Amino acid sequence: MTAQRLLLAAVLLALAVPARAHRLDEYLQAATVAVARERVELHLRLTPGAEVADAVIARIDRDSDGTLSQAEWDGYAAAIQTDLSLEADGSTLPLRLTRAQFADIGQVKEGEAAILLDFAADLPPASGPRSLTFENRHQGGIAVYMVNALAPRDPGIRILRQHRSPDQSSWRLDFVTERPVH
């Protein structure tokens, strides 16, 4: 192995981070967006770090009894939904919660658990150039946002560009929907 390859290997090893690791003092909010002809799916993975977990739990635990009921989790999912917005071609798309998976409170406190929320919205059909805009305003003071588009399953949809705000709380996807061949 040459010295150059050895140096490259050392740099890559130094940059490697375990897949589950994230900062303790942040609320990681990772979104993936899947676009289809008549539907948009938003998958949100929320992972509070151990140092901010108590603040997140306090927002969920409305009666402050130290346990999280299904009603409190449902209320939290609804609160998150109000902090999200999705638009297609300048028109608001109402989001529907389609799945919610909540974590064990002990794991949340240790920063080792994720809250998984899936949303869907109807996308008015159109062909040609289009844009999709997503904004996440949930717990901005402690949040770290990430957002990315998934590759479309439909070959008639082509992703052109993704535009992100510096903190990724705001994101726009430019894409093209081609007419289906009959």
Image (cartoon, grey):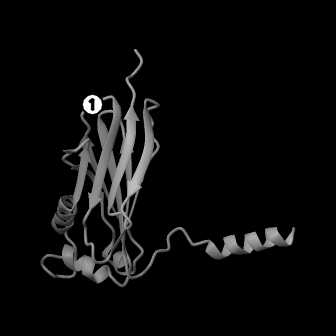
Quarter of the image for residue 3 reads bottom right
Work out which quarter of the rendered image holds the C terminus and state it: top left
- Give residue 58's position: percent from left, percent from top: 21, 80
- Give residue 18's position: percent from left, percent from top: 56, 71
- Give residue 99's position: percent from left, percent from top: 28, 52
Instruction: Look at the image and tell me whether residue 18 can be seen.
Output: yes
**Nearer to the camera, 32 or 70:** 32
User: Which residue is located at x 62 percent, y 73 percent?
Assistant: 15
* Element under disc 1: loop
Quarter of the image for residue 77 reads bottom left
User: Which residue is located at x 42 percent, y 51 percent?
Assistant: 162
**Nearer to the camera, 9 or 22:** 9
- From the viewer's perspective, is 12 left or right of 158? right
Classify mark 1: residues with Cα within 10 Å, few (<14), some (14-19) or many (20+): few
Position above or below: 178 against 167: above
Q: Residue furthest right?
A: 1
**Nearer to the camera, 125 or 57:** 125
Work out which quarter of the rendered image holds the N terminus and state it: bottom right
Callout 1 amino acid:
Pro
Quarter of the image for residue 181 reads top left
- From the viewer's perspective, is 80 left or right of 28? left
User: Which residue is located at x 27 percent, y 30 percent?
Assistant: 125
Q: Which residue is mark 1?
A: 125
Position above or below: 37 against 48: above
Position above or below: 101 against 40: below
User: Which residue is located at x 50 percent, y 74 percent?
Assistant: 21
